[in-house]
C-alpha cells in the first residue's frame, strides 16, 4: 500500500510539471522508456537499487544513459527521485503517471490477456468491447498467457472480466466437487 502511495505522490508531482510545460505526452513516453530500460536491464537495476552506491553515482549513470533521450525536466525529476532514495519506485511512478495522463485524456488503461497471440482485427474488437464496458476510451496493453487455455481476461482498473477457459474449468470443477461432498 505504501509503495503505491509513494509512487502516486511522485507521479502527481511530475504530472503537474508536465501540465505546466504542456508536455504530458512527451514526459509520459520518456518516463515509460526510462522505466522499461531499468526494468529490462539487470545490471542497471543492480547499480540503481544497491543501497551502497552513492546517489551522485546513480545520478551520473542516469545522466550518461538518458541525457539525449529525455527532457531536462524528466532528468531532473529522476535526480530528485534518486536524492530521495526512491529509485526503486521508478517503474511504479511511470505506471501511476500513465494513469494520471490517461485520466486527463479521458482514457482508462486496460490489460488484455489471451491464451494465444491475436491479430490486429481481434485486438481492435476487444478494445471496442472493453471501451463500452468501461464507459471510456481504453488504452490497452496486450499479453499472452497460455495457461488460460482459451478465452480472454480483461483488467480495467480494479475490475476483472475473466472469460478464460481456465477459470470456467475451475468453476465447473468446484461445482462438481461441492455436489459430490
Image: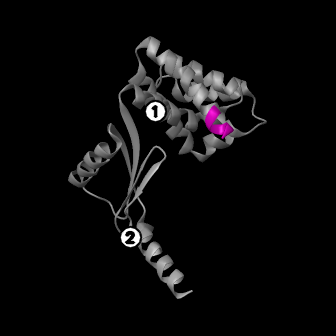
Residue at the image point whose x is 24% and y is 55% from the top: 122
Name the mark nearer the viewer: 2 or 1: 2
Residue sitting at x 45%, y 24%: 27
The residue nearer to you, when weighing 130 against 88, is 130
Percent across and percent down for residue 32 are 47, 34
Which residue is tagged 2?
165
Give the magenta range: 1-5
Considering the numbered disc 1 on the image, is that residue within a helix, a strand or a loop?
helix
Quadrant in which residue 116 is drawn: bottom left
The earlier-in-sequence mark between 2 and 1 is 1
The reply to whether the magenta stretch includes residue 167 is no
The residue labelled by disc 1 is 98
| Badge 2 density bin: few <14, some 14–19, many ≥20, Cα 10 Å | some
Q: How many marks?
A: 2
Outermost residue, right side: 52
- Front one among 79 and 92: 92
Q: Nearer the viewer, residue 18 or 67?
A: 18
> Residue 160: x and y, percent?
44, 53
Asked if labels 1 and 2 touch by Cβ distance under 8 angstroms, the answer is no
Q: Quadrant of the C terminus?
A: bottom right
Image location of residue 38, percent across then percent down: 56, 39
Question: Which residue is at the front of the view, 5 or 48?
Answer: 5
Amino acid at each position: 500500500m505504501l509503495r503505491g502511495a509513494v509512487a502516486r505522490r511522485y507521479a502527481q508531482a511530475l504530472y503537474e510539471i508536465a501540465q505546466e510545460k504542456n508536455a504530458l505526452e512527451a514526459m509520459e513516453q520518456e518516463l515509460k522508456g526510462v522505466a522499461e530500460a531499468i526494468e529490462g536491464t539487470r545490471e542497471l537495476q543492480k547499480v540503481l537499487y544497491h543501497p551502497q552506491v552513492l546517489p551522485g553515482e546513480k545520478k551520473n549513470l542516469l545522466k550518461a544513459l538518458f541525457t539525449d533521450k529525455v527532457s531536462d525536466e524528466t532528468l531532473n525529476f529522476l535526480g530528485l527521485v534518486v536524492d530521495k532514495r526512491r529509485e526503486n519506485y521508478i517503474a511504479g511512478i511511470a505506471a501511476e503517471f500513465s494513469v494520471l495522463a490517461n485520466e486527463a485524456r479521458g482514457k482508462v488503461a486496460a490489460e488484455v490477456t489471451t491464451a494465444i497471440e491475436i491479430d490486429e482485427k481481434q485486438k481492435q474488437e476487444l478494445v471496442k468491447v472493453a471501451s463500452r464496458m468501461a464507459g471510456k476510451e481504453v488504452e490497452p496493453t496486450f499479453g499472452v498467457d497460455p495457461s488460460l487455455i482459451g478465452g480472454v481476461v480483461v483488467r480495467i482498473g480494479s475490475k476483472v472480466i475473466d472469460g478464460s477457459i481456465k477459470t470456467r474449468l475451475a468453476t465447473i470443477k468446484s461445482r462438481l466437487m461441492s455436489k459430490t461432498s
